[in-house]
Amino acid sequence: MKRQKLVLAAVAGLFAGASAGAQAPAAKADNVQCWGVNGCGGMAKCAVTAEDLAAVKKLLGDAEYQKKFGKSEVHACAGKAKCGGSMGILNWMETPADTCKAKGGLVIEGKPGARVARKA
């Protein structure tokens, strides 16, 4: 009887360890919100503000902004994100910083009232 309890306890421990390992991984510390490289809405994340659009426009200048992101609109969530950079719409997705840089993405930093865009 003791042996059966030990076996059951061991099996229960294995299942507990397996389920703990199956949890979603935490975001990596080197990930950034990479703007302008995402595909369609399912990949884009929530909230593009007028301040975000203005920061990118200031970085790129009006002509380049219109060429790359001229169809962009302010929106509150991914379901409204439409398509991304390849379609002339500015959105963001979380990527490793080096991936963002390799794809020519932008990073917007700062808090509301002080948003600044830079090339990744």
Image (cartoon, rainbow, N blue to C red):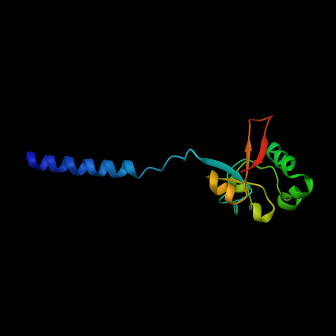
The residue depicted at 41 percent of the width and 52 percent of the height is: 22
Residue 38 falls in which quadrant of the image? bottom right
Closer to the camera in the image, 25 or 82: 25
Rendered position, 60 above or below 68: above
- Give percent across and percent down for residue 61: 89, 52
Farthest residue in the left direction? 1
Rendered position, 42 above or below 24: below
Farthest residue in the right direction? 63
- Give percent across and percent down for residue 89: 79, 59
Rendered position, 43 above or below 116: below
Instruction: Judge left or right: residue 35 versus residue 96.
Output: right
Closer to the camera in the image, 80 or 88: 88
> How many marks are shown on the rendered structure?
0
The residue depicted at 77 percent of the width and 47 percent of the height is: 118
Farthest residue in the bottom direction? 86
The residue depicted at 31 percent of the width and 48 percent of the height is: 16
- Give percent across and percent down for residue 43: 65, 59
Closer to the camera in the image, 11 or 111: 111
Instruction: Judge left or right: residue 101 versus residue 116.
Output: left
The residue depicted at 92 percent of the width and 57 percent of the height is: 63
